[in-house]
Image (spheres, coloured by chain):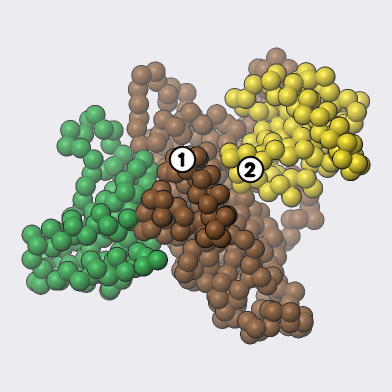
Chain colours: A yellow, B brown, C green
Amino acid sequence: MADDKLLAEMQALRERIAGLTGAAVASRDGLIIREDIGDLDPDNMAALTATALAISQRLASEAGQGSLRETLTRNTGGYVAIYAVGTAAVLVLIGDEGLDITRLYRESRAAIDNIEALLT
Amino acid sequence: MTDVGAEEAAIGQLREAFTVCVAAGTTGVLQVTGDPGGAILFDRGHVIAVQTSGAPSPEVLLLRSKLVPESEWNAAFAAAAATGAPMSAELISRQLVGAGELEALLLAALADAVFVIASGTVDEYRAEPGLPDCELALEPGAEAAWLVAEASRRIRVLAAETSGHDRWIVAASGAVRPGVMLGGGQDEILALADGRRTARDIAFVLGRGVYATMLQLDRMRQAGLLSTVSSRPVTDADGGERGRGAADGESDVAPGLPRRRQDRPSALRRPWAQGRASELRPPFSLLRPRSAWDGGGDQAP
Amino acid sequence: MPGLTEALHQVMAIEGARAVALIDIATGMVVRSVGEAAGEDGDFPAAAASLAGEARIACAMPGPERTGGDLDEISLVTANRLQVSKILGSRPGGGCLLFVDLDRSRVNIALASLQIGQLAPAVLG
């Protein structure tokens, strides 16, 4: 099932990247597709992620800076990184303070392509 | 056994690199590429800080353990930024932490970080001149040889334990009983032991060192309170569980420390456990006088 | 900053003290040491780790069942030595041992105990 492959893709990311504590894929209209985020509320995360992506894309556009690569929220207790997956979905990655965000961006490229392929 | 060989090689690599940096009186960053790898900051041949994704930084240790409240930290950070004073001085002058307490914490953080890097794999290392900004540096820096010796001691202690360490920590059924407090931090650990976290992850949440956490997890495992699994259960669309990974006291991975090595692109997995140690050299020589760092050209080793 | 080493030197001034060390309880690591610290076979790090392990076990006992209160000090007495380990800065899974190794033939135990008790709180401060 594509669902399990999605989950497997997210779990593989978590295995590879130290500090990545959660991952979820949601639709652009804020509905959760698949999640591996532990105790966090998937519905809230999905809705917020979709909104954040939309706003960030508009910010990038408004600033005349081309297309959005990544929205990164840096918090006291870690990071939330959001990426567009094609035009219909969004990937949110959640990490603790030890997350290597440079490495995260690099490693997430392949995962995003794989997830996009799984969703089409 | 090749995994043990790789770990021994990692600490050997670090020992070698540290020896060179100490002899050269290096001021700069020793970048260690590997899993987890990291960056060791040297000031005149002494280690003042270590950055790695594998172990909590001093800031995480202070904040997550609630030694320093977040609001106080923010105020100290703002003040330090404004005056250019080091964060450590600001924390001490505001009496958020004692001077001796902070020194002990920084030393513990350094030792934990070096231990974690030495317990993983090292693909290569290179030294870069110049020091980046570092929030909580140990002044004066620590002896590099001492850090390696301590890392080696910790690896030996863990290797002597009877069962291997697999990555995901799971509370044993019945370990958590309503109304029963185990104390000593064990309740917090059981609450986190949901199969999605490694020892490193738990250490970050609690604001404690990775090695200290591993010791406690091992005690709890011996007490039957938790177990480790090598792969996490895959849940199906209804949220039920299928195909639980082996929950075992004896790991199917060679005894060692939690590492993320599955699914790594093969290019990153180097067969370097035997005999390659001498082949790995920094791209330029560390053995040059400190003054050469300032705009000096690259010299071939 | 004067630092831990200087604080340990102050404890070293106690009559009969041969070695003073600060040991991290959670890891057994010797944080700082002054003097001739030696365990059996001269392996002080191993002895320190062992001592810290004992402290962890003693500190791990749940509060309500330990009517005497929190662990304060561990003392080891042999024919020639008195080794006092005072718990400093104790918190769940944390804290340090202030380890003082004294020559029994030179030490006034009561005085040394008093002096250690007076100097200990300032070590981490």
Pinpoint residue B263: horizontal percent, then vertical percent. 74, 44
On what subunit does the disc labeled 2 rest?
A
Q: Is residue B231 above or below residue C43?
A: above
Q: Is residue C123 above or below residue A43?
A: below
Three-letter amino acid code at disc 2?
Answer: Gly
Residue A19 is labelled as: 2
Q: Residue furthest front?
A: B83
Q: Secondary structure at mark 1?
A: loop
Comparing B208 with B172, the one in front is: B208
Kind of residue indicated by mark 1: Pro
Give the image location of residue A91, x and y in percent. Answer: 78, 31
The answer to whether residue A11 is visible is: no
A56 vs C91, left or right, is right
Give the quadrant of the C terminus of chain B.
bottom right
**B144 versus A45 height, above or below:** below
Q: Secondary structure at mark 2?
A: loop
x and y, in percent, of residue B285 in the image: 70, 80
- Residue pictured at 44% horizontal, 32% vertical: B188
Do callouts 2 and 1 mark residues in contact (Cβ within 8 Å)? no
Q: Which quadrant would residue B299 be assigned to in this image?
A: bottom right
According to the picture, the residue beneath numbered tag 1 turns out to be B69
Q: Quadrant of the N terminus of chain B?
A: bottom right
B22 with respect to B293 (left or right) = left
Tell me how far mark 2 sits from mark 1, CA to CA. Answer: 23 Å
**B47 on left or right of A83:** left
Looking at the image, which residue is at 42% across and 26% down? B175
Q: Measured from the top left, where is residue A42 in percent x and y?
A: 68, 21
Residue B124 visible within the image: yes
